[in-house]
Image (spheres, helix red, strand yellow):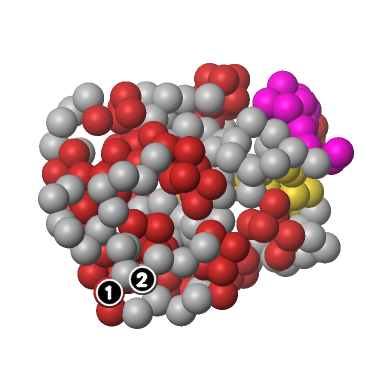
Amino acid sequence: MEIKFVLDFDGVLFNSAFEAYSVANRAVMGQPQYRQDVTYEEFLSYRSVVTDAWQYNRLYSVDHGLPAATIRHFLAEEIDWAFARDFFDARKAMMQDPEWPKAMPPYDFFFLLKPLLLQFPERFAILSTRNVQSIRETMAFHDADVVPVFGQEDIRKLGDKLAVAKDQHWLDRNKWLIVYVDDMNSHLEPFEGKIHLPLHANWGYDAGTPGSLTANQVHTIISSLLSIVERRDQL
């Protein structure tokens, strides 16, 4: 059995909320069909349920806004895809600045984990609703672009995070021991009973639960399991 540590990006490795807020505001700037007064607190509330950039349209749209609680069950329309195109164009423009990743400060967990990422890149993967290029550029900025990345493009193609995991055969419990770390309970719930160890990070955007773990606790679990596997492989 092989072990793989699958990590969410936003809310686990990096605090990207302000970056996404900055991108969204740039995308709508000066356009009367969009609100120009969305506060950071409003954005954070919406961010906790967003799985794709198009959904921010329903926060910023003057005439087509929706409550955050309903967004998960809403199917995108052309106006939403148009917003998503503007959003990614705005991010692409921002990424021309080589200092752009500074808008996403790493969590302490990233610094704890970085030596293991560099030493055992084949044991890790990133699974995120963020687009792949921005993840890779951020990791490269911190000299850690060494692990496979599955992002928004994969999720749009296959359906959701669980479908990506299935496509990678990570749900084969006889072949893989998967440890999946995410800060969103809604992203972890589909994995319950399908992988060996889904872990909820208590330092991201979602509310903590009695079973939530700190960065030090998750790092201890990962480093301990790595030690066991590496010792096994040396026998």
Q: Residues within 10 Å of mark 2 (few under 14, many from 20)?
A: few
Residue furthest out toward the right: 210
| Nearer-the-camera pick, 130 or 69 | 69
Q: Is residue 222 magenta?
A: yes
Residue 64's tag is 2
Res 86 quadrant in image: bottom left
* Placement of 98 over or under 184, stated as above or below: above
The location of residue 34, given as percent across then percent down, is 25, 58
Q: Say what secondary structure mark 1 lies in.
A: helix
The location of residue 95, given as percent across then percent down, is 20, 39
| Nearer-the-camera pick, 148 or 8 | 8
Which range is magenta?
210-225
* Residue 153 seen in the figure: no
Q: Residues within 10 Å of mark 1 (few under 14, many from 20)?
A: some
The location of residue 57, given as percent across then percent down, is 34, 62
Q: Main secondary structure of the magenta part?
A: helix
Whether residues under marks 2 and 1 lie with C-beta atoms below 8 angstroms apart, the answer is yes
| Nearer-the-camera pick, 204 or 4 | 204
N-terminal of the pair, mark 2 or mark 1, is 2
Tell me the residue at 35%/79% (across/down): 77
Find disc 1 in the rendering and name its residue.
Answer: 79
Q: Say what secondary structure mark 2 lies in.
A: loop
Q: Is residue 211 magenta?
A: yes
